[in-house]
Amino acid sequence: MGPFLLRRLLTFVATLWVASVVVFSVLELLPGNAAEVILGDTATPESLAALQTKLGLDRPALQRYTEWVGGLLHGQTARSISYDTPTAELIVERLQVTFPLAVLSMTLSVTLALSLGLFAASRHNRLGDVGVMAASQMGIAIPNFWFAILLILLFAVKLQWVSAGGFAGWSEDDGGGLWPAVQSLLLPAVALALVQAAILARVTRSAVLEVMREDFVRTARAKGLTRRQALWRHVLRNAMIPVLTIMGLQFANLITGTIVVENVFVLPGVGRLVFQAISNRDLVVVRDVVMLLAGVVVVVNFVVDVLYAWVDPRLRGSDM
């Protein structure tokens, strides 16, 4: 297990380093420089020079990259141009919305997908299987922002059960609280979870059907286990490797891909922060948020690799 984890840890560090180089280099390759992009064509030479000094653009690129990465490692970030606040504070504040939204969406997605995938696989080529596959195909075909609009029209406009948008806040002092905050996130979470659940349900069904054809499942049934017992004790764990892959990618996607849904529901999350930063040409915020999102994807993939080894011990000694 030790060498396996060491290889994965080295890959994790190397990938983060490459991601930081790419993110930094993309901004360096912009026409002109970041100060010109932020201030626009009408900026005076004096304002350009002042902003270049503030952003450190008068220093060599390698020095700026080293200072940026060193600051990230020590938890120190540059100040946002439009908010005049360290980007770390902005991101942490917005993650209080985006991260719970992603966790809630993932919980709904996994619960729904595993239930439907197992249900469809246990009724292969019967009405239940056909119905689940048809519903999942519709879920994949319809984008989540369209689901979001439909949910708003039904539950917020017609039934008036919840608010159409906004975030109540986690603090009761601000008029929010745990339940009002969860209510604010419920419709966005459902809109995000439906598409992800449709994909994961199909993967779960295929993986379970493949494992059910293995010899050890027939042996377990021959020893007296019922179909349900064999399904839960033997089939599901062995079918989890491809499912874990999709789950890891989906959780990273829920963190990094909430821009549209957060804007539909006017949620003050990381996705909306990126949208606002791009509109304000605040490249400092864009750079740090993109690096955070890249880091989330790398960390999730690392966790999935470790879960692989836990689910299937054979992988610990392999060169996977």
Image (cartoon, grey):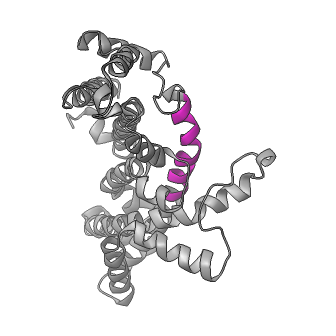
Stretch in magenta: 89-105
Image position, residue 102 (x, y; %): 50, 52
From the viewer's perspective, tell me whether residue 108 is left or right of residue 175. Answer: left
Which quadrant of the figure has residue 12? top left
Q: In the picture shown, does residue 278 fall above or below 247?
A: above
Q: Nearer the viewer, residue 261 or 283?
A: 283
Q: In this orientation, does residue 113 appear?
A: yes
Q: In this view of the protein, which residue sits in the foreground, 79 or 170?
A: 79
Q: Quadrant of the C terminus?
A: top left
Q: Is residue 221 magenta?
A: no
Is residue 226 visible from the viewing direction of this image?
A: no
Q: Nearer the viewer, residue 303 or 62?
A: 62
Position in image of residue 256 (x %, y %): 39, 47
Give the main secondary structure, helix, strand or loop, of the magenta stretch: helix
Residue 306: percent from left, percent from top: 37, 37
Residue in the image at 34% along x and 78% along y: 138
Is 31 placed left or right of 92 in the picture? left
Q: Is residue 307 above or below residue 14?
A: below
> Residue visible at 46% across and 61% down?
110
Q: Residue at x 47, y 67 (%)?
A: 191
The x, y position of residue 209, in whole percent, is 29, 70
Q: Residue at x 32, y 69 (%)?
A: 202
- Assign the N terminus to one quadrant of the image: top left
Q: Residue furthest bottom?
A: 127
Residue 103 included in the magenta stretch of the image: yes
Label total for image: 0
